[in-house]
Image (cartoon, rainbow, N blue to C red):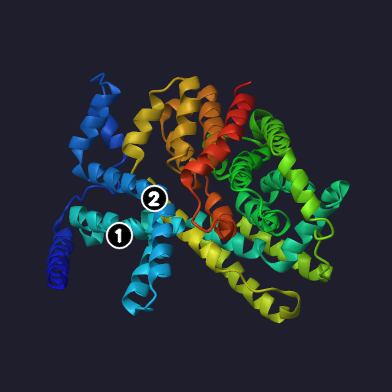
Amino acid sequence: MKKAAYIILCALAVLLFWNCSYGELIEDPVEIPISLSTYEQSEAGKNLSLGSILLHRMNASRFNIATLIIFLAAIAHTFATPKIQRFANKIHKNNTDNSTKIHLWSNFLHLLGEVEVVFGLWCVPLVICMIYTFGWHKVSSYFRYTIDYSEPIFVFVIMVIASTKPILTLAENILGRIAKIGNQSPIAWWLTILIISPMMGSFITEPAAITIGAMLLSKQFYIYHPSNTLKYATLGLLFVNISVGGTLTHFAAPPILMVVNKWSLTLSDVFLQFGRHAIVGIVTSTLLYCAIFRKEFRKLNEESKGQTSVSQTKIPISITIIHILFLVWTIFNLHVPTLVIAGLLFFIGFMQITAQYQGKLNIRSPLLVGFFLAGLITHGNFQAWWLSPVLSSLSESVLFFGATILTAFNDNAAITYLCSMVPNFSTNHALQHAVLAGAVTGGGLTVIANAPNPAGQSILSTYFPSGISPLKLFLGALVPTIIMAICFMV
């Protein structure tokens, strides 16, 4: 078995080496990925059906078929992660002899069961396929000049800063004053976090809002061990509310950021078309779930009497203000990764100086989330060939529901970005509204539907010992998603 593996690896290495050299000899190499305009020019005037267009593009480049298969495999892997985690736990538990080999297998399966790692792992066969098809020099040029990883870098840095002790203490104190109306009981905290935190995302960005919201839910709600049904309902509601909560402004939600300049959207445009409807949807969904689980909330309130409290940590206001300034710097330089990373390095230095007022620097969760988004962007860039014709062939109402469904299987920012490249959308405000509303509405159905979701899952995953089930998450988010859809449609 080992010899066969070595032979396969050597053969693959030789093949890639040959193709890397071959890549230097190509005088007019194919674009990576092939631009939509190239397809559209060859299809112009032929009056092709959607199926014919997709078949034509598959035949034009076999690489398209390969990337789609790899992307679908990554999605299937995402949905299988809970089962992989359970299998890994079983192997670890049955390892009574403490065998090193079995322990390594268990750790490897745990890695495969980390949802944040999935898309990054599936980038390996994708890159191998790219090198084989286009040659190393073309591929290296693509990663150097074409692909943009500014969003994963931004999310990583904003999560690191937002999860620090001064920021969390400030957020906890602000939300605690609101929760004080309900004596800071679990239900009071639950309502406050799920209604206010998502709306904060319109000002401090969604990744920062979900980081704060998830950490406070962990400390003020999940710690009291609610039922499994309520756990998933809360997680689904958090994801949906965060996805639409960033629509009060035009600079916070990734799906809006991707198109705000191309479609000339202003602050008033975004708030009037999306923000006010999002507020109604957030409040309605949260109060509905509160009513459905009222009996369990009463029980949790009784069990938690005398236990809930707001952090009493005293942190100098000057340190908190400096942390906020670092947040502002990161948000302001969202599309300049060099300045974002430079800000993070200065921030780490500041944390070292003020260590007595700081907690442990949280790097693992932000790093996993950044890796997840980088993998998703790498795969998503090669899906435009089929996403664009599918979306541009839909009417307004069908486009709304189509975007909502497609968002569940691809990042909602990628959906709106791809639509911004379709000529039909540039002047049609109804289509713009349909795709944006659909993209943010479906942002809570799966972990990969919205960029901040992996952050919330990473923080709250400890309360789901067997891993977070994609199906149960989908069911938990389904009712709020329907409510949001009704709000945006009306």
Element under disc 1: helix
Crowd rating for badge 1 (residues with CA inside 10 Å; few <14, some 14–19, many 20+) = few
Q: Is residue 383 above or below residue 356?
A: above
For marks 2 and 1, give the one nearer the viewer: 2
Residue at 45% x, 20% y is 395
Q: Is residue 38 above or below residue 168?
A: above
Q: Amino acid at mark 1?
A: Val
Left or right: 461 as drawn, with respect to 104: right
Residue marked by disc 1 = 124
Q: Is residue 388 above or below residue 148?
A: above
Left or right: 468 as drawn, with respect to 69: right
Q: In x, y percent, where is residue 359?
A: 69, 73
Q: Quadrant of residue 167?
A: bottom right
- Whether residue 261 is visible here, answered yes or no, is no
Q: Quadrant of residue 328?
A: bottom right
Residue at 52% x, 28% y is 432
Q: Amino acid at mark 2?
A: Ala
Q: In x, y percent, where is residue 26?
A: 16, 55
Q: Quadrant of residue 96?
A: bottom left
Residue at 83% x, 52% y is 184
Query: For residue 80, which numbered disc appears in the image?
Result: 2
